């Protein structure tokens, strides 16, 4: 499985979803800064590791993984996403996220799981 490809699809799905809720701040994968691409790739790696261990990643676990990564990179809570200040409004526990923000985690989980399932089926057929 190509982690870059899956990360790009997760990013673009997130961007499309954000646009539907009025958040047009997301740039395309090709325009995204390296830190954002690395974050998406780490998310894919987290989900794949969980799936490889025989567990199903949850949306809450996805968010908590993102929080740990952001904490390690020096991010903190801020009312508006600001990469220069390393502040993000979703820098809260999963259960404190608004439903529309939780949806992003559900989408990420579903996309990685779909690619994982397809790669497992492909390996079995060989």
Image (tube, helix red, strand yellow):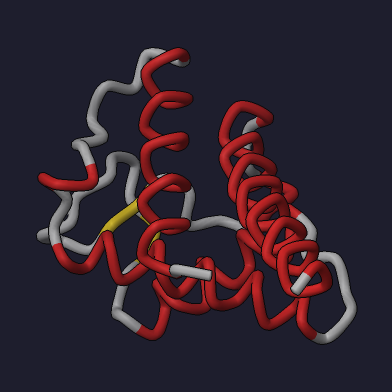
Q: Nearer the viewer, residue 16 or 125?
A: 125
Question: How many numbered marks does the figure carry?
Answer: 0
Q: Position of residue 25 (x, y in %)?
A: 23, 30
Q: Nearer the viewer, residue 119 or 11?
A: 119
Give the left or right position of residue 106, taking residue 121 as reference. Answer: left
* Residue at far front of view: 126
Give the left or right position of residue 106, taking residue 23 as reference. Answer: right
Residue at horizontal 61 percent and vertical 59 percent from the top: 63
Q: Nearer the viewer, residue 101 or 85?
A: 101
Residue at horizontal 65 percent and vertical 74 percent from the top: 48
Q: Is residue 12 above or below residue 82?
A: above
Give the left or right position of residue 82, taking residue 58 as reference. Answer: left
Residue at horizontal 47 percent and vertical 25 percent from the top: 17
Q: Position of residue 107 (x, y in %)?
A: 62, 40
Give the left or right position of residue 35, taking residue 103 as reference. Answer: left
Residue at horizontal 44 percent and vertical 69 percent from the top: 3
Q: Quadrant of the C terminus?
A: bottom right
Q: Is residue 44 above or below residue 9?
A: below
């Amino acid at each position: 499985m190509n982690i870059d490809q899956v990360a790009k699809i997760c990013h673009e799905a997130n961007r499309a979803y954000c646009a539907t809720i009025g958040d047009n701040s997301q740039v395309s994968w090709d325009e995204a800064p390296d830190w954002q691409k690395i974050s998406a790739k780490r998310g894919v790696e987290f989900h794949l590791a969980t799936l490889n261990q025989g567990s199903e990643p949850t949306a809450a676990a996805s968010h908590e993984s993102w929080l740990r990564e952001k904490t390690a990179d020096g991010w903190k809570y801020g009312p508006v996403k600001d990469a220069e200040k390393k502040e993000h409004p979703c820098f809260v526990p999963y259960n404190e996220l608004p439903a529309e923000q939780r949806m992003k985690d559900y989408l990420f989980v579903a996309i990685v799981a779909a690619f994982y399932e397809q790669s497992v089926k492909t390996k079995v057929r060989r």
